[in-house]
Amino acid sequence: MKEYRKGPVLLRGRNVPESSTSERLLDEHHRAEWLHGDPWRVLRIQSEFVEGFGALAELGPAITVFGSARSAPGSDEYAAGEIIGRLLVESGYAVITGGGPGCMEAANKGAAQAGGLSVGLGIELPFEQGINEHVNLGMTFRYFFARKTMFVKYAEGFIALPGGFGTLDELFECLTLVQTRTVKRFPIVLLGHDYWDGLLAWLRGTLEAGGKISPTDLDLVYVTDDPEDAVRHVLAVRADG
């Protein structure tokens, strides 16, 4: 049976390519297609991790703040984000956000105006704005999973303002990591009882009642209406841990 070796990969039968790697490299036709193949994507993914690790390795203590990109300047949650960003910097922490507008911009603004390190980790999306102007250390990712790794790896806690699917995604990612003890002592604070209590009631009444989570799992989350209390709780848990 005809066979072909592609590095460590063995191909036989109909899987044998009709042209060699060198031939495809030198072929002028469709010369950009190789950029979108899975092997090249692996290198892009690797480069995102390398760049992210390099940019953030010396960040120091930091807290990740999330919230809706749609929160308007002047709204209560935007004002809360500014306060949280400022208080974290005044407490010696850098602030990490998703780098976008809304609550993320607010936290970056508070951090930057307080003279601290304001980090924005953006994502390349067709409908998403770029990094907001209050970020003084920013990076844009192609892949959500690489970006999410940076949010958790370089943060010592998580504060979530009201937000949508992206905020919920990060919230449950962090809850899962703490619940499974993949990460140790990682405080998670939700700002706004009116916004979050319905979700927590559903989790208790459905997941906990059905035995899908333990009664103590939701103790991992702290809810408050006060931005100052949110920061105090994150810092207190870090000090106890």
Image (cartoon, rainbow, N blue to C red):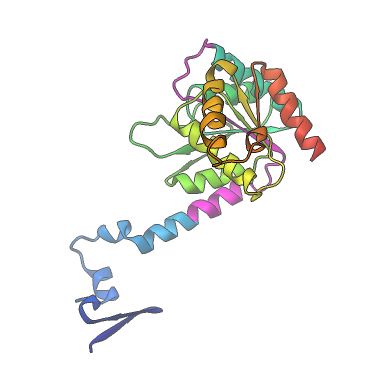
In this rendered view, identify the residue nearer to me: 180 or 203.
203
Q: Can residue 73 be seen in this view?
A: yes
Instruction: Give the residue displayed 59% in from the left and 24% down from the top.
Output: 107
Q: Is residue 76 above or below residue 12?
A: above
Q: In which quadrant will I find the C terminus?
A: top right
Q: Where is residue 220 in the image (x, y as percent from the top left)?
A: 66, 35
In this rendered view, identify the residue nearer to me: 90 or 185.
185
Instruction: Give the residue displayed 21% in from the left and 68% down from the top.
Output: 27
Taking the magenta stretch, the answer to whether it contains residue 10 is no
Q: In this view, does 165 lie above or below 43?
A: above
- Magenta span of residues: 47-75
Q: Position of residue 225 (x, y in %)?
A: 64, 16
Q: Is residue 76 above or below residue 152?
A: above
Q: In the picture, residue 56 is in which quadrant?
A: top right
Taking the magenta stretch, the answer to whether it contains residue 74 is yes
In this rendered view, identify the residue nearer to me: 140 or 184.
184
Q: In the picture, residue 91 is in which quadrant?
A: top right
Q: Is residue 104 visible?
A: no
Q: In which quadrant will I find the N terminus?
A: bottom left
Q: In the picture, residue 77 is in which quadrant?
A: top right
Q: Where is residue 25 in the image (x, y as percent from the top left)?
A: 28, 69
Q: Where is residue 164 in the image (x, y as percent from the top left)?
A: 45, 27
Task: State the residue lying farthest toward the front.
Answer: 210
Number of labels in the image equals 0
Task: State the residue lying farthest toward the right.
Answer: 240
Instruction: Give the residue displayed 56% in from the left and 24% down from the top.
Output: 161
Tell whether 69 sits left or right of 120: left
Q: Is residue 14 above or below residue 92?
A: below
